[in-house]
Image (cartoon, helix red, strand yellow):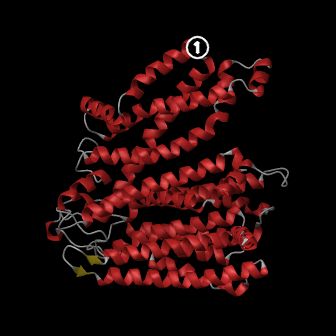
Amino acid sequence: MKTSEYQKRMNKVKLSGFVEYKNLTFSMGATIMVGFIFLIFGYDFIAKTVSLGMIAVGGLYLLTALYMYLVLRRARREILTTGDIGETTRRMGWPMTFFIFLTNFFGTIGGLSLVGRKKCIEFQLCIFMLVNTMMVMLVSALNIFKPQIPRNFWLGMGLLALVEVFYIVVTVMVVKYTDEKNIDPRLKVLLIPLVITTLTGNFFALILAVTMFKRLYQKNKEISIEWIEIMRRLFRNYMAVIGLLVVIFLLSISICSYLTFDYAVSVENNYEALFQSPSLAYPFGTDNFGRCVFSRIVFGARISLVVGMTAIAIPLVLGGLLGALAGYYAKVVDNVIMRVLDVFYAIPSILLAIAIIAAFGASTATLVMAISVYNIPVFARLVRATVLSVSHSEYIEAARACGATNPIIIFKHIIPNSLAPVIVRATLEIGIAVLSTSSLSYLGIGIPSHIPEWGNILRAGSSYLEGYPYMAIFPGLAIILIVLAFNFFGDGLRDALDPKMK
């Protein structure tokens, strides 16, 4: 019995050493789950009808999951017997790269990871960079089936295609000129173009550029770089990376929608298309005014993300500064700052937001202010606690002994060394801020109702749950998805920045 348990643990250790195996395992599980979701949506329990399109997509997902299971089983056997994945098994990953045309992005990630032997962080970033742009292109391509194609659609798709070709070139060069220890100096020419392509919202390109820059300009290649180590620990947590992928995808589609989507179909009434069921022209159907729910959700992502990030960035700066001052000076300054902030912290967040909106009127700026005010004490308390533990450290005493003034000590030494827990908390709070935005809009006191925002879309759809449930289901799923994505990414980032996890 003990031998069997020991063997299982040893097998688990062997398998965990292969990123390809972990990616493939998660991809298969996610594919099965999505396949069953399509099958469930393929049957209308109210009208008792069957959607053959949904059933077909669900069946395709399950078939791809079966293929992935066979590849995974073969890879597992080879790892446990030979200690590596064979070339034939790796070549079986090529068909999986084409799963993206079935919108099975998980299968594509697993296939690319299996095909490439590279385990360096640059190659993994290239995979997600490629998949993100392809996801944006495929989602945008659904506008081809609209009665009227957006005016700048082909320009946007052409630019995205050029960016994707460039990313393929970058991936080929990364495979050829990098490994876990060395990187070829010739890759310096890619840094600026990668940063420029970040304008499409694909922040995997920016992360890749920073990572390559860190490795290219270090003097001693044997010395580990903190940024590289953080990224490696982050990418060991697959759920965190998937959360990051969802966040970056929503950012990308929000930016690219200026060219590839038509804003008019999301706000203008179309009485010839009232209550259309989900189809290729209207993937999420139409609402009671004939507006495309899919387009409304895409444009709503802009507002939700902008409000969520802005509403956290403001208290992050203000609360961080107040917390740093309270923690460093203590006594009178600490008491004055923290007691004032305690007053705001004692008021329930929803009531404080309602009071601010009632006083200044419902608008996007007011909503940002309402969410920000409540979060200032949250970040102030966090930074204060961190500063109290840091302010008596040896390097702070050394800075004082060298004649450093209090502002220099605070901004150059204390705040930079207190950022890790603050960044993690900010990441988690963005998801909560997005949820708060949707909640206030759902109550009718947030974003004005005529603007496509997820809470507004959910509110409009909730009146038609019995006859047209898709109007509420899809915006509700979007809210759940973005909150989960930020939570998963925040949890992974916390582990990556935790010194104990090194």
25 with respect to 218 (left or right)? left
Residue drawn where x is 76% and y is 72% of the image: 3
374 or 279: nearer the viewer:
374
115 with respect to 61 (left or right)? right
Q: Is residue 345 visible?
A: yes
Residue occupying the far top of the picture: 332
Quarter of the N terminus within the rendering: bottom right
Residue 99, position in %: x, y? 51, 79
Q: Amino acid at mark 1?
A: Lys
Q: Is residue 354 above or below residue 85?
A: above
Q: Is residue 133 above or below residue 244?
A: below
Mark 1: secondary structure:
helix
Q: Is residue 292 visible?
A: no
Residue drawn where x is 49% and y is 21% of the image: 338
Residue occupying the far bottom of the picture: 88
Residue drawn where x is 74% and y is 73% of the image: 7
Q: Is residue 156 above or below residue 108?
A: above
Residue 25, position in %: x, y? 59, 73
Picture quarter containing residue 206?
bottom right
Residue 173, position in %: x, y? 71, 70
Residue drawn where x is 29% and y is 73% of the image: 146
Residue 47, position in %: x, y? 18, 76
Picture quarter containing residue 267?
bottom left
Residue occupying the far left of the picture: 271
Q: Is residue 166 above or below residue 342?
A: below
236 with respect to 443 (left or right)? right
Q: Residues within 10 Å of mark 1 (few under 14, many from 20)?
A: few
Residue under numbered circle 1: 331
Picture quarter containing residue 142?
bottom left
